[in-house]
Every structure is written in structure tokens, then in C-alpha cells.
Image: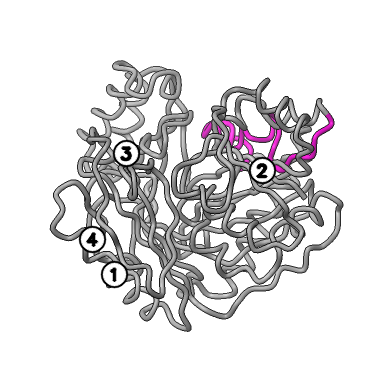
């Protein structure tokens, strides 16, 4: 089997590492990839948006399976193009990926099909949005409707902050097309967790839970990021809540999309919050989460290539999981998620007892330099979470006195989060 992975980040590196374990997989290609992937995959000078080139490469090189990592190519209809070319691809169509591409659409779907989520209202008019905020008070959440690289959410502790977010998004166009419409929603207090599933139509095969840490700094302080670290499984989530989330959220959403003529194939990701009334949806993604994938895939006992093949062929993949814990901590460029410098040389970190997934690196002779905000994730698998975290943090000490990088010191130790 020849596999093509589309994307360039830590999520894609994790998938490549898992595919490399499969005796079925002969060659792995990645477009465009990053430097850390070169040990296991052949990098292609093709961007995720170059649909014609990607389809042509897959045809010419007898690619048996393509998996699309990032959200933008999905919403641009890359899966549709592969399907039209009669190429096997794992990911949702453009219509199905709208579950991530529009928060308003996702909210409407959840309301129609009784999928638990926060109360909300959508707006294109700033004055109406502010009126709604004044009526409901703070804390309250303001979200850009479209894709904003994980940064289009403001958890406003005051009415003034919420109204500033409205102005930034609707009037100043902070996120361009993505913030031409906004969703203002009820603030929910509780423990956040992530739950992903392999999906085809109405068939849902859930993974283990994970918990992401989105704020930039320790104690869940600072701006939202794409994710500063994660751990799996989230054992503080009761099994009853897990079962409820699978049945009332993932299963119900897959069935709803099928009923709407937007049948979903791929990875359905639910960002959830555990409330006194049970789990509720914060957001949906139409692909593997990042950095959740990096801590979930090492716990999967199955052959990933076989799992995806089974799902595509309407067979139960019979998912099995190692009864261990996995933790991962992201090393980021100083300044992220704002402006940051590229081309900074990475110190050599210890790889004893840990694994690394690269997100924003390029080659520099016998080492690596930075090319992105999130640089890499260092992770570990152990019988218990604390042991995994100890291994990871021991490995990262070389970054402590380097002004070009930072990382959170409390991953896996800070459970209470807000949305």
C-alpha cells in the first residue's frame, strides 16, 4: 500500500509515524510535510491547496490511500476532487466539512437534531450583537463563524470585552471572511475534553478521550492557541459521560449530517465540555485534532491503515487501545500565537523514553530551525500519566534558557478549563 498524507504539522507527523508501523504500508508520501517527517516519508513540493497536482501525483504514483490532515483543503473540496478521480481518500466532502467551516451551520444542526450545546445567536450586525450581549451579560463567548486557525474565539469576562470582540470581528474584519458573521453564545463552566471518531455515514467508531490545553501560558492564561499540549485518555471523565457523548453527540451528529444530505466520512472531532447537565458541544472539527492526535495515536493498538480500510469498506475496525497514558507538550516559538521569528536553531533535546512529532521545522545542516509557531511536540507513553509527564519534562529542559522558545509547565496538571 502506498499512502499519501496531506499536511505539514504535528498531526500529520503523528499519522505518518502510525502508518510507518503498518506491514501493509510500503511507501509514505507527504505534501508538503516538514523536516522531521523525512525519516519515514518522502516529502513532496506540493502545497495542500494544489488540487490538480495532488490528484495527478496520486494517479501517477499508484497511491492506494490518501488522508487529508488540515481543515482548509477539506473545505476547499479536495476530497471531492479525489473522489471524482476515482481515488481512495479518507476525509469528508466539502458539504460535510461545513460542520467545522461554519459555527452557525453547526449550531443550527445541533438545535434541529437536539444535540447538546450552549445557547447562542448568530449576527452580522454589530449593534444587534452588542444588544444581545448587554441583555445576557458576561461572561459570554464571541466566535468568528469561519475558520480562524483556532484563534477566533474570545471568552469575555466582561460586557466591554465582548463588545470589543464584536467590533474587532465584524467591523475591523479581524479574521477576514471568517468573521463576516459571528456566533455569540452562552458561557459554560466545566472540564473540557476532546472525543474523536472514525466515521462513515451513520457508522461511528469512537477513540479514547483526550484533553487539549489551548491557552498559551500556565494556569490556562493568555490567548487561545492551536493547542499547547494534551494527554490521553482523560480518565477524569466518567464512563457514563463518555457513553452519553458517543450516543447523543457523535452518533446523533453523524446521523444528522446523513439526513441533511451531507453524509460524513473521515474523522469527526467533538470538542466537549462536561457540565452539570452532561457533556455539551463547544465545537466540531472535520478532521483529526492537533495536538490530540499526537497523544491518541500512540495508544491505538490497531494498524491504522487497516482501520481506515475497514471503515471505508463498511467493516467494524474493532478498535483496541493500550491501557496506558500518553502525554505531549508543545514547544512553541516565542511570541506565538502572535508574531514570532523564524529560522531559530533548535537545541538538541533528549529523546530517551520519549517521541517527537514535528510541526514547524526545517533542516539546517545537522539540526533543525523553526518555520512555524508551534515547533514540535515531545510526548511519552507510560502506565500512568504522571510518569509520562516526568519523561517529557525531563526531555524539554534544554529549552528552558533559550529565549526563542517557550512551553507550558502544567500540561496534564490543569484540568479545570472554561469555554
Q: Earlier in the sequence, mark 2 or mark 4?
A: 2
Horizontal placement of 15 versus 359: left or right?
A: right
**377 or 130: nearer the viewer:** 377
The colour scheme of the drawn protein is one colour
Mark toward the viewer: 3 or 2: 2
One can see residue 368 in this view: yes
Q: Distance between the residues labelled 3 and 1?
A: 30 Å
Q: Position of residue 328 (x, y in %)?
A: 40, 63
Task: Using the rendered view, name the quadrant where residue 263 is placed.
Answer: top right
| Magenta-span inclusion, residue 91 | yes
Task: Name the element at disc 4.
Answer: loop
Residue that carries the numbered disc 3 in the rendered image: 154
Few, some or many C-alpha atoms within 10 Å of disc 2 (few <14, some 14-19, many ≥20)?
many
Q: Going 75% across and 30% down the picture, which residue do you hit?
A: 82
Q: Earlier in the sequence, mark 4 or mark 1?
A: 4
Give the alpha-carbon distance from disc 2 to disc 4, as whole Å. Answer: 35 Å
Residue bearing mark 1: 393
Segment tinted magenta in the rendering: 86-111
Q: Earlier in the sequence, mark 3 or mark 1?
A: 3
Q: Residues within 10 Å of mark 3 (few under 14, many from 20)?
A: many
Disc 4 to disc 3, how far (Cα)? 17 Å
First in sequence: mark 1 vs mark 2: 2
Q: Mark 4 points at which residue?
A: 219
| CB-based contact (under 8 Å), mark 2 and mark 4 | no
Amino acid at each position: 500500500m502506498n499512502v499519501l498524507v496531506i499536511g505539514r504539522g504535528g498531526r500529520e507527523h503523528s499519522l505518518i509515524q502510525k502508518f510507518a508501523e503498518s506491514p501493509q504500508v510500503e511507501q509514505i508520501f507527504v505534501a508538503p510535510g516538514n523536516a522531521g517527517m523525512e525519516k519515514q516519508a518522502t516529502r513532496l513540493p506540493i502545497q495542500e491547496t494544489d488540487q490538480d497536482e495532488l490528484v495527478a501525483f496520486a494517479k501517477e504514483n499508484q497511491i492506494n490511500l490518501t488522508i487529508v490532515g488540515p481543515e482548509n483543503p477539506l473545505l476547499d473540496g479536495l476530497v471531492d476532487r479525489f473522489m471524482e478521480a476515482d481515488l481512495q481518500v479518507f476525509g469528508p466532502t466539502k458539504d460535510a466539512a461545513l460542520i467545522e467551516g461554519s459555527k452557525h451551520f453547526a449550531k443550527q444542526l445541533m438545535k434541529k437534531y437536539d444535540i447538546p450545546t450552549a445557547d447562542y445567536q448568530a449576527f452580522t450586525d454589530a449593534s444587534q450583537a452588542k444588544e444581545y450581549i448587554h441583555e445576557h451579560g458576561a461572561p459570554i463567548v464571541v466566535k468568528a463563524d469561519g475558520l480562524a486557525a483556532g484563534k477566533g474565539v474570545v471568552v469575555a469576562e466582561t460586557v466591554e470585552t465582548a463588545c470589543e470582540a464584536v467590533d474587532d470581528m465584524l467591523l475591523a474584519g479581524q479574521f477576514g471572511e471568517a468573521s463576516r458573521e459571528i456566533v455569540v453564545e452562552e458561557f459554560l463552566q466545566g472540564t473540557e475534553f476532546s472525543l474523536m471518531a472514525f466515521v462513515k455515514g451513520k457508522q461511528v467508531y469512537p477513540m479514547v478521550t483526550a484533553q487539549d490545553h489551548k491557552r498559551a501560558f500556565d494556569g490556562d492564561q493568555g490567548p487561545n492557541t492551536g493547542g499547547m499540549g494534551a494527554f490521553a485518555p482523560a480518565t477524569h471523565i466518567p464512563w457514563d459521560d463518555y457513553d452519553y457523548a458517543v450516543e447523543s453527540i457523535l452518533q446523533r451528529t453523524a446521523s444528522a449530517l446523513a439526513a441533511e444530505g451531507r453524509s460524513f466520512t473521515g474523522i469527526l472531532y467533538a470538542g466537549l465540555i462536561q457540565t452539570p447537565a452532561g457533556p455539551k458541544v463547544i465545537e466540531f472539527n472535520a478532521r483529526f485534532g492537533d495536538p490530540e492526535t499526537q497523544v491518541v495515536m500512540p495508544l491505538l493498538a490497531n494498524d491504522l491503515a487497516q482501520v481506515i480500510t475497514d471503515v471505508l469498506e463498511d467493516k467494524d475496525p474493532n478498535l483496541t487501545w493500550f491501557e496506558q497514558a500518553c502525554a505531549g507538550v508543545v514547544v512553541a516559538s516565542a511570541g506565538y500565537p502572535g508574531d514570532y521569528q523564524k529560522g531559530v536553531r533548535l537545541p538538541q533535546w533528549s529523546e530517551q523514553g520519549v517521541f517527537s512529532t514535528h510541526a514547524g521545522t526545517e533542516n539546517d545542516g545537522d539540526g533543525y530551525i523553526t518555520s512555524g509557531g508551534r515547533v514540535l511536540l515531545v510526548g511519552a507513553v507510560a502506565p500512568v500519566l504522571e510518569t509520562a509527564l516526568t519523561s517529557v519534562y525531563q526531555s524539554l529542559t534544554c529549552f528552558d534558557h533559550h529565549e526563542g522558545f517557550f512551553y507550558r509547565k502544567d500540561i496534564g496538571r490543569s484540568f479545570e478549563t472554561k469555554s
